Image (cartoon, grey):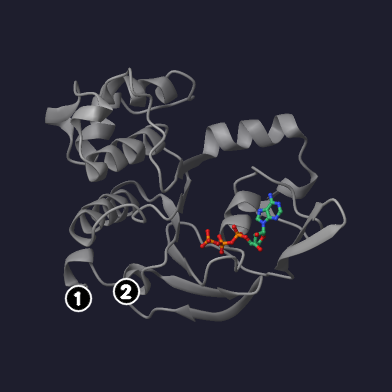
Amino acid sequence: MTKIYRSGEVDVSALSGVDLSLERGEIAVMLGPSGSGKSTLLNLIGGLDRATSGRIWFNGTELTEASDRALTRYRREHLGFVFQFYNLIPSLSALENVALVTEIAPEPMAPDEALAMVGLKDRMHHFPAQLSGGEQQRVAIARAIAKRPELMLCDEPTGALDSKTGIIVLEALTRINRDIGTTIAIITHNAVIRAVADQVFTFKDGRIADHQRNASRLEVSQVSW
Ligand SMILES: Nc1ncnc2c1ncn2[C@@H]1O[C@H](COP(=O)(O)OP(=O)(O)OP(=O)(O)O)[C@@H](O)[C@H]1O
């Protein structure tokens, strides 16, 4: 994949010939300095933006040929997104925030089941302002998993959290991978997270500077933070 952003006279080369494969049921971690192209990559895989050149497939369907309408359906039916900031609706409870998504998904979990998976069943009637940052991020994760996505794309999910809270959020993500087999891609600046991944991609200047496959994965509790 190549992605060039054109703004006025200036061309910014965000990705320059990146070639990778995410395997079903795996966890992939994307590392690299600010501006190295990680978010651009996730946006292309997530059908939120279009590659300048190159081809992308999801389960054998070519996304780079899909219409906008087909990309919307792809995002809705197959993907869950988690961002650094939780994007919860402040006037809705945790349960209602999750239910917003389950109402438009084909075979969703019950919203309270999704909240139970991230350890927040007893907080489901609380509003975002009554929850800590880590709890709000877990609501955002529950919202993403409630539609049983095949792939979760997480852009710095622990970026706004202290390390202890980040660990709890990471545990929620790895539990979902283990329990329902969701493939997960995580962008992070925290290099120790690499130990919980199957594949680790390190980006530099819009390219993959390093790619490693871990022979075995550590549990979040086994990582020294
Ligand atoms: N919409 C855009 N228009 C113009 N340039 C962009 C746009 N989005 C990203 N870029 C540029 O593309 C390059 C890659 O950005 P990207 O956000 O993918 O990096 P990143 O590795 O995710 O960085 P960070 O860790 O800071 O989030 C940067 O030089 C950035 O300024």
**Furthest-left residue in this view:** 122
* CA neighbours of label 2 inside 10 A, class few (<14), some (14 to 19), many (20+): few
- The residue sitting at 53% across, 66% down in the picture is 34
Residue 220's x, y, as percent? 23, 65
Q: Check the picture and name the quadrant holding the C terminus.
A: bottom left
Point out which mark residue 224 bears.
1
**Furthest-right residue in this view:** 9
Q: In this view, does 11 lie above or below 173?
A: below
Q: Check the picture and name the quadrant holding the N terminus.
A: bottom right
Residue 26's x, y, as percent? 43, 61
Viewer-side residue, 172 vs 43? 43
| Residue 3 in which image quadrant | bottom right
The kind of residue tagged 1 is Ser
**How many numbered discs sit on the rendered protein?**
2
Residue 211 left/right relative to 37 = left
Residue 137's x, y, as percent? 31, 42
Q: Is residue 212 above or below residue 72?
A: below
| Residue 55 in which image quadrant | bottom right
The kind of residue tagged 2 is Val
Marks 1 and 2 in Cβ contact (< 8 Å) = yes
Q: Which of marks 1 and 2 is nearer the N terminus?
A: 2
- The residue sitting at 68% across, 69% down in the picture is 18
Viewer-side residue, 76 vs 32? 32
Q: Is mark 1 on a helix, strand or loop?
A: loop
Quarter of the rendered structure image containing ligand 1: bottom right
Q: In this view, does 58 lie above or below 163?
A: above
Residue tagged by mark 2?
A: 192
